[in-house]
Amino acid sequence: MKVNILVVDDRAEGLMAVEAVLKSPSYNLVLAKSGMEALKFLLKDEFAVILMDVQMPEMNGFETAEIIKTRDKSKDIPIIFMSAISQDEQYVYQGYKAGAIDYIMKPFDPYILKSKVAIFVDLYQKNIKLLEQAHLLHEIEIKTYTQALDRLELESLRKYRYLADSIPQIVFRFLPNGVHEYFNKVWFQYTGFSLEMSQGHGWQEAIHPDDLSSIYATLKKHPSEEIEVECRIKSQKGEYRWHLVQFGPEKYNDQEEVVTWFGTATDIEERKRNEGFQRLLVNAGEVLVSSLNYKLTFEKVADLATQEIADCCRIEVLNEKGKLETVALKQDTPENFPDFGSMTIIESGKSLLKPYLSHEELGECSLMVVPLTIHARTLGSLTLLYKQSRHKYDEGHLKTAEELGRRVAMALENSVLYDLSQKAVEVRNDFLSIASHELNTPMTSLKLQLQMVQRILDSKDSNAMNRFPVSIGNSLRQVDRMIGLINVLLDVSKIQSGKFHFAFGKTTVSEIVQEVLERNKEVFTLSGCELYVSNIPDMLVIWDKMRVEQVIVNLLMNAVKYAPGRIELNVFEGEETVDIEVRDYGKGIDKEKIRNIFDRFTRATCDSIAGMGLGLYIVKQIVDGHEGVIKVNSSDQGSSFVISLPKGDQLRKANPLTALKEMETFNERD
């Protein structure tokens, strides 16, 4: 006699696929295209097993199964769900909750489908035989029937245990007092417990003590309901992994008293860890914006990381000297934290992932090192480590760690920018104070000279009139000084706005030097300085004559101001460059100040000497504009500034008219 099998799928191709696999002289396949049609067939016929698709319009597989289980005639028919949507735990659990006995993912393995259907058909046929034997109770002895029934029950139990062992989750059954009744083979494989170790209350040794009390509290609170709890179960490797445990009470008939508890435990460690990563990103984001003190916030981030996703966490940043500095370190042991190549990670800008790493001191561990990168700049590294193979990092964890590294880098950059802005404000305030003093000095002197001239004119004293030219001369010198200061400020403004242009043209080195000496000979005479000039070569160059003169004048005036006495101006001709040296024999410049001597508002000497700290900054910009180099050598025997400028032959060969046109444009603009 053929056995009825009900196949439910809203798609014709799905029905055809199952029909092709199960086609057999022993089976009568009944095909239903919806849940409603399946319910109609169940009213008319009996079925050994139901194969049901999950995703169907109007009434899905879960809803149809729930209705089937409410009917006395069909509640005991085994249901196998078929689905292609997801293997996610929530769909599997929902299927079992709806009454499924098994769950098959599409596309299914024909051999597995045939085997599982054959098991339920066999059970159905044996149940039919049981019913047939019930009609023979009056013809056979009770003892013989009981023995046959026992054999059938044992056979059924064996097949159901086979099904339980084929499920990847832990399946269990225990009495209300917690005494073990049954575990499937997954339990023994995962925990490493033997049957003897699991019997009685022995299975509780694998449950984390904190979670065991929570489980019993939940069972006590819901003594006859289906419940879900999360707990940690120890593996045979000694690590605790999170599991989702689902309990269901088993009762006799309609009695309220629970006879046994049965359920499953599913490993959710990866889900919990992913939740930990996401929680870390959220909490770390809040911490990183809470303060601009990055050392304090990085300590908090490292602490959060060791709580959620690591046993050890180290954050390193590059200091001003380009050396790695550990700013945060959290670990569960006081031993030294080894270097896993942080500098290599920083230089390459690429992350390092070692799911399994054997270390001499730490043993088996899992490692991630990610660069702290922002705007294509790497500022440091973040190291995360699980020790003793407690967990394993993967590519998904690495992406989250890289996002954390990006946020840490952003916080570090914001902190550095804030510090720089504060220093810039201090420098600006110092400059404004110096500039106001420098500008006020010639203005005050000019005012005094003009007041003196006014008194001379008002007195009409012929003797006093003799002092009139002196006052006018002094006034003009103060005006020139003030114009010089204003020109310096204008040059700085042009540099910052990108309008600091050059007008290259043909000139000679001797012409530039002679112009500088002629224009400033009175300064050297009045200052009492001795200027020694070497033989100046009369070579042709293509330079911005006015800017190069400005460089030489600035260096000479610095020597007069800071190291009065013997001053040398030397010029040397190379194959492609001209070297101009200004040497003094003063007390020299501190080595710490030489590094920043060409920065804006930087003064390498004491504050008792006037100056805005802009002269050498402008000199450096002019030299850079000529694609030249400026070097400083200083000791307690004096200082030497050497400027090396290209002769400009390439520019002259390329287009000799360009420089002249630029010169004309520059003169018209100024």
Image (cartoon, rainbow, N blue to C red):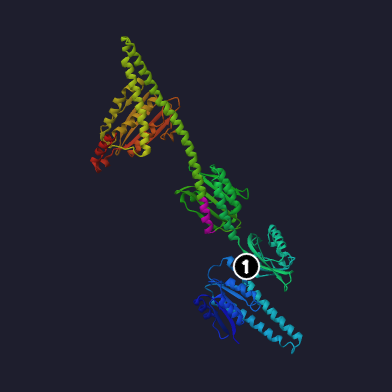
Q: Position of residue 429 (x, y in %)?
A: 46, 32
Q: In screen coordinates, is 540 left or right of 43?
A: left
Residue type, numbered disc 1? Gln
Category of crowding for the residue at label 1, using alpha-carbon neighbours closer than 10 angstroms: few (below 14), some (14–19), many (at least 20): many
Q: What secondary structure is found at the residue carrying circle 1?
A: loop
Asked if residue 100 shows in the view, the reply is no
Is 401 covered by the magenta stretch?
Answer: yes
Q: In screen coordinates, is 666 left or right of 266?
A: left
- Residue stretch in magenta: 394-405
Instruction: Tally the numbered discs.
Output: 1
In this view of the protein, which residue sits in the foreground, 174 or 502? 174
In this view of the protein, which residue sits in the foreground, 389 or 99? 99
Rendered-image quadrant of the C terminus: top left
Q: Is residue 61 above or below residue 560?
A: below
Is 159 covered by the magenta stretch?
Answer: no
Which residue is disc 1 drawn over? Answer: 169
Q: Position of residue 665 (x, y in %)?
A: 26, 37
Q: Position of residue 258 (x, y in %)?
A: 73, 69
Rendered-image quadrant of the N terminus: bottom right
Q: Position of residue 394 (x, y in %)?
A: 54, 59
In this view of the protein, which residue sits in the foreground, 666 or 654? 666
Asked which quadrant contains residue 650, the reply is top left
Farthest residue to the bottom: give it.
Answer: 139
